[in-house]
Image (cartoon, rainbow, N blue to C red):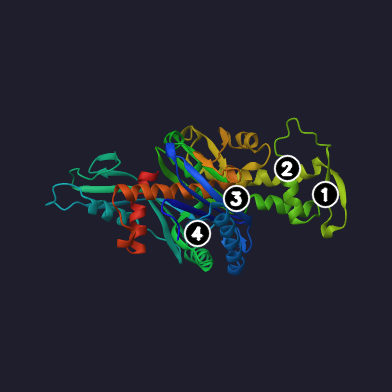
Amino acid sequence: MLKDGLVVGLDVGTTKTAVVVGEASENNEIYILGSGIAPSSGIKKGMIINIEETIKTIETVVSDAEHISDADIDTVYISVGGYHIQGQNTRGRIIVPPAQKEIVAEDKNRVQEAARAIQMAANYEILHVIPKEYKVDDQDGILDPAGMVGSQLEVETHIITASSIALRNLQKSVRGSGLKIKDSIFEGLAAAEAVLTPDEKELGVVLLHIGGGTTDIVAYSNGYVKYSGVLPIGSAHLTSDISIGLRTSYQEAEKLKIKHGVIWLENVNLEEKISVANAGNDGARLIELRQMIEIIEPRMEEMFAMIKSEIKKIGPAAKIPAGVVLSGGGALLNGITKFAEKTLELPVRIGKPNNINGLTDRVNGPAFSACIGLLMYGLKFQNHSHRQSFMRTNSTYDGFKSWLKSFFKDIF
């Protein structure tokens, strides 16, 4: 059984599966006790395609994390990714009973339920309902309407939905490895929690979480989520292009991308010779770096053209003064910051997990932002439940999940 105070985040991604164990430390930081990391198997574009292979990978990383942290891991927060994830803004409106003197918690619950009444594709379900602000009669911009007087209550929310089938397959894989799931969090939200600052969220910022098979986009303004979406393209597509273009194995292409990959050509020697292993382990050959860059450039241009198109849906650049923050393994490509700034015409920085200490050597980069974000969610839940004297055992899981969603505003 997991020791009191410990939280575990499990990020099952297209190219890697990672689990991190942590606990709260001083100064609102997270102390990392251990981690487990392994290449993913049985996953494509963030979705499970082989449950048995996924279970084996999860068991491997959990075993490694248990050995390092000396913890018995049985409960985890999991990230949910994939192109099936969809976000939309919605409103709910209710009439406050005339005999009621003031707005109470039940009214907040009712108006949030009204906001959930949305049309969804078949076999989809709501993953998150994130309240942004309330309106009482003609007064808007209200963060908490409890105790206020009014006849009509409205709420503006951001709702994130997911494919029920994709979600169930992920959850089945996790439970098949012997773990219980505390909650399921959209990967983009988890990454945002780890790398964005409160000031950025308040000013207006866009997070680009570039994973192996997909790219998550989450935009904030005035402290709240205003947009979320997922693009079906990620860093694994670039690796595949290199593999095909240079006639080498996928594993060799990944190594070449990490060691020699570059997208901003300032001070780059295009005639530099690099060794490429031939497919089938049939020796190696030397090529000019120029050849690999000619493969990288069109794929990155395609990816960021798609990203720019999505950002335009959010609003003009003036509404994103804090710019763009990159996270995920795809953010490690050399020169990507300058390339993104030029393409998106916005300030760009690389996001790394904030406020962590302990055994951070393996998990302090942008590739682990989602996993660290899961820990932050978990610890915030623990703190909130303590302040509210909330007893997990007194509620059904569905009730717990509904309650957790109701305090997302505190998190964001």
Tell me the mark number nearer the camera, choosing from 3 and 4. 4
- The structure residue drawn at horizontal position 43% and vertical position 36%, both measured from the top left corner, is 27
* Cα separation between marks 2 and 1: 13 Å
Residue at the disc numbered 2: 261
- Circle nearer the N terminus (3, 4): 4
- Circle nearer the N terminus (2, 1): 2
Between residue 385 and residue 258, name the one nearer to us.
Answer: 385
- Circle nearer the N terminus (4, 2): 4
- The structure residue drawn at horizontal position 55% and vertical position 44%, both measured from the top left corner, is 208
Q: Amino acid at mark 1?
A: Val
CB atoms of marks 2 and 1 within 8 Å: no
- Circle nearer the N terminus (4, 1): 4
Q: Amino acid at mark 3?
A: Gly
State which quarter of the image contains the N terminus: bottom left
Q: Amino acid at mark 2?
A: Gly
Label 2, residues with CA under 10 Å away: few <14, some 14-19, many ≥20:
many
* Cα separation between marks 4 and 2: 39 Å
The picture quadrant where one finds residue 349 is top right
Label 3, residues with CA under 10 Å away: few <14, some 14-19, many ≥20:
many
On screen, residue 236 versus residue 143, left or right, reads right
On screen, residue 346 versus residue 77, left or right, reads right
Secondary structure at badge 3 equals loop
- Circle nearer the N terminus (3, 2): 3
State which quarter of the image contains the C terminus: top left
Tell me the mark number nearer the camera, choosing from 4 and 2. 4
Label 1, residues with CA under 10 Å away: few <14, some 14-19, many ≥20:
some
Q: Determine which of the numbered discs, if any, sits on residue 211 in the image.
A: 3
The relative height of residue 15 versus residue 338 in the rendered view (above or below) is below
CB atoms of marks 3 and 4 within 8 Å: no
On screen, residue 371 versus residue 240, left or right, reads left
Q: Amino acid at mark 4?
A: Asp
